Image (cartoon, coloured by chain):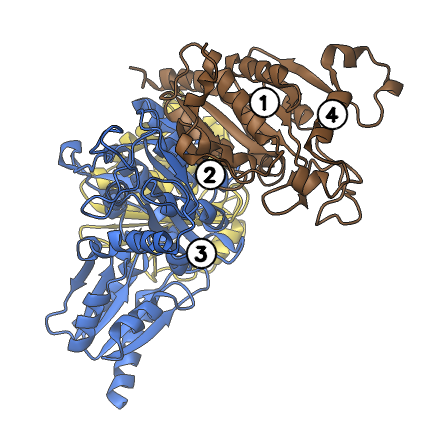
Amino acid sequence: MRKQLRLSGSGGQGVITAAIILAEAAVSEGKQAVQSQSYGPEARGGASKSEVIIDDEKIFHPHVKAPDFVLAMTQKAADKYYTDLNADGVLILDEDLVPTPPQFKNIIRVPITKLAVEKVGKALFANIVALGVLAKVTKLVDFETIKKSVANRVPPHTVEQNMLALQIGFDAVN
Amino acid sequence: MSARLMQGNEAVAEGALLAGVRFFGGYPITPSTEIAEGMAKLLPQVGGTFIQMEDEIASMGVVLGASLAGKKVLTASSGPGISLKQELIGYAAATEIPVVIVNVQRVGPSTGQPTAPSQGDVMQARWGTHGDHSIIVLSPWSVREAFDLAVRSVNYAERFRTPVILLMDEIVGHLRESVELPAESEIEIYPRRAPKKSRAEGYEPYAPDEDLVPNIANFGEGYHIHVTGLIHDETGFPSGSPKVTRESIKRMHEKISRAADEIIDVQEEFMDDAEFAVVAFGGTSRTAYEAVLSARKRGVKVGFVRLVTIFPFADKIISELAKKIRGLLVAELNYGQIVGEVERAAKGQCAVKLCAKYDMTIFEPEEIEAAIDEMISEVDGE
Amino acid sequence: MTERSYEKFFRQNRLPHLWCPGCGNGIVMKAIVQAVEKKLGWTQDNTIIVSGIGCSSRASGYMDFDTLHTAHGRAIPFATGIKLANPKLNVIVITGDGDCTAIGGNHFIHGCRRNVDLTVILFNNNIYGMTGGQASPMTPLGKKATTAPYGSIDRPFDACKLAEAAGATYVARSTAFHVQHLTKMIEDGLDNRGFSFIEALVQCPTAYGRRNKIGEPAKMMAWMRDNAIMKSAWDKLTDDKKTGDKFPIGLFYRAETETYDEAYHHVIELAGGAK
């Protein structure tokens, strides 16, 4: 069953890394996955978007259309990237950074960045908190598999903090 | 080996390494930088050398020097960097130095749109450097094929002693997908050609072997060869002779054209009953394939033709196809480049239509599918 | 050393050379092979000559080594590739004032900066000789060239100062007149581990001398004799004496610094690729 995700924010928030980890986790469970990205010419600060398609079948066209899940970590990203969401899809927003949620049926608001700062110590971990949220909401990949993928991808001395961030995100939604 | 998530650019670095590349010179530029970064990390792990040069011209120069000293070499760039490389791509063609140049295409001309996909460098890949030269150009559509064609590019560069362009695009270069890579033992490697005569036996570095390719000695092996970008005879020294000039240019073309059937790789799907076909290459062919699948579901007799080898161009294959079918739709992410080659090869035997896009975004399957329908109704109406 | 023993370093079947009568390039080419001859362990099999494009760069074709006649300005990147691919090879670069400081200027300063173990010998004839006398970045102020018919207004480079500032670890200058000194400067350059730069002034009677009414080759060499001042004497001169055409020759700079291939070997060790 094909599922399409779009993770968006501004450059430097780590949404691309989060997307890569999610795709890696899917692949390690034997699924097909493609991850693509678009960002501004500058490495920091510009609009940033990454898309992941997960399927049991081979994936050719890599572009997401009518995503099932959209994560937006800034107001600008939310306004720009939710519009083609599948009508039954879910829009996940950083509660503080998207003060004016778009009009959409299924919205989940989580204070992602605030949780990263207050409970893990740095805004840097917001993307992993977001990944924990996505793991819980999407149910596409086993949480344990995502944990392993996070541990493989992040610098060794940050594994503990990243695990904490992931768990906080996972526990932040029902 | 189990599947893993890998990026196209990363796969190029891995493939080149397994094919025996031990020297990389480059200059960072989006969207090819991950290849340089990969080589910077991987090469010293196997005793190889990575060097970041002052510009793209120097990047070409340094890898050509290393190739002459016996190493298999790679360089990679995009957009403006590829333009700078053209000078010494010509030098490599003229002096028959093996080298692989990866071009991860982005939107041009000039600085263009650095992070956006395009396939606008197709004819540059063929004719970018000045002069009447020959070249091999390959283009992958998947991460796995980026790996495979990196290996094939290195082997062709060595076998034909020619520059080979691995023509990527941002779509495949930056795409991550699940891949299973072959084991090292499964990879065939073409070794550096070696002289078959000693100096005493009258060795001439540019004397062609039976396949028209010369067995040029590496520097430091005692052959005292001379390499020059001036037109040279079989001794390697400059010649002002019209005959030498003619024969040298002719041989450099024919060493590749006589092996064209082997070099040319075209994937054909759903062609048995096809009345029409979509021709595509690189990242665009992923979308074209979905468009064809979708049209097939509606009962449209359309096939899929993917150019893995871009140059030498698949003249014979396209010409044969053109005899059998009624129309070819060329989908490419530019204003229309490979369509000219397809028209030339089709020789008017079937309709050739262009589906072009050049707005920073990739094709959606619906766009190509609509173009298929449009082509069919146009041809039906003719 | 037998008389004319240096002749074995030339490809006799490629001579005579194409340089004009009275040209200084042959003098420097001979000084190079005589310096190589004195170097223990440097053979025609393990020494590579790399050149760019221009009169000077044709020297590679006459020298019986593995030789590489590259593209205009690009000799240093090619030489860098050869040296790093096979650090056992000795690599000499022959270049000219236009080749090295105009179109190859960026490669020149970055070669110096990296301290790649190369010896670069710049044949400075103050002009583009091969193409008939266009101005180079080392054409002196006021001198005429086909592209500076009223005299050059472009301030010239001092290539030695440029090399030193950019990080070369051996910098020297000599002239085609001072043959023994020139040979010694090259020899010491070959000895230096790292980027060595030697500027050799050469007379170009055809494209430079004639147009600037300096006279025949012998007069141009007499000018070198009369105006070149050894570095030690130059340093003692007060500024008011450093006038007119006077210029210093000799060793200007020498430093011991790790070469690029030595430094890269550490990278290989760190990466675990050392055998």
Q: Earlier in the sequence, mark 2 or mark 4?
A: 2
Residue that carries the numbered disc 3 in the rendered image: A81
Image point (52%, 43%), residue name:
A96
Compared to residue A18, the image places residue B113 above or below, namely below
Image point (75%, 27%), residue name:
C223
**Which image quadrant for residue C136?**
top right
How far is the residue under mark 1 from the one under mark 4? 24 Å
Tell which of C158 and C271 is nearer to you: C158
Please identify the residue farthest to the front as the structure is shown. Answer: C3
The amino acid marked with disc number 4 is Ala
Image point (50%, 55%), residue name:
B113
Which tint was used for chain B? blue
How far is the residue under mark 3 from the one under mark 1? 58 Å
Residue that carries the numbered disc 2 in the rendered image: C70
How far is the residue under mark 1 from the one under mark 2? 19 Å
Q: Chain of mark 3?
A: A
Q: Chain of mark 1?
A: C
How far is the residue under mark 3 from the one under mark 2? 52 Å
Residue that carries the numbered disc 1 in the rendered image: C197
The amino acid marked with disc number 1 is Phe
Residue that carries the numbered disc 4 in the rendered image: C222
Question: Which of the two marks, 2 or 4, is nearer to us in this view?
Answer: 4
In the displayed structure image, the side of residue C211 where residue B247 appears, left or right: left
Tell which of A117 and A17 is nearer to you: A17
Which tint was used for chain A? yellow
Asked whether the residues under the numbered discs 3 and 1 touch, taking CB atoms below 8 Å apart as contact, a structural biologist would say: no
Which tint was used for chain C? brown
- Determine whether the residue tagged by mark 2 lies in a helix, strand or loop: loop
Q: Chain of mark 2?
A: C
How far is the residue under mark 4 from the one under mark 3? 78 Å
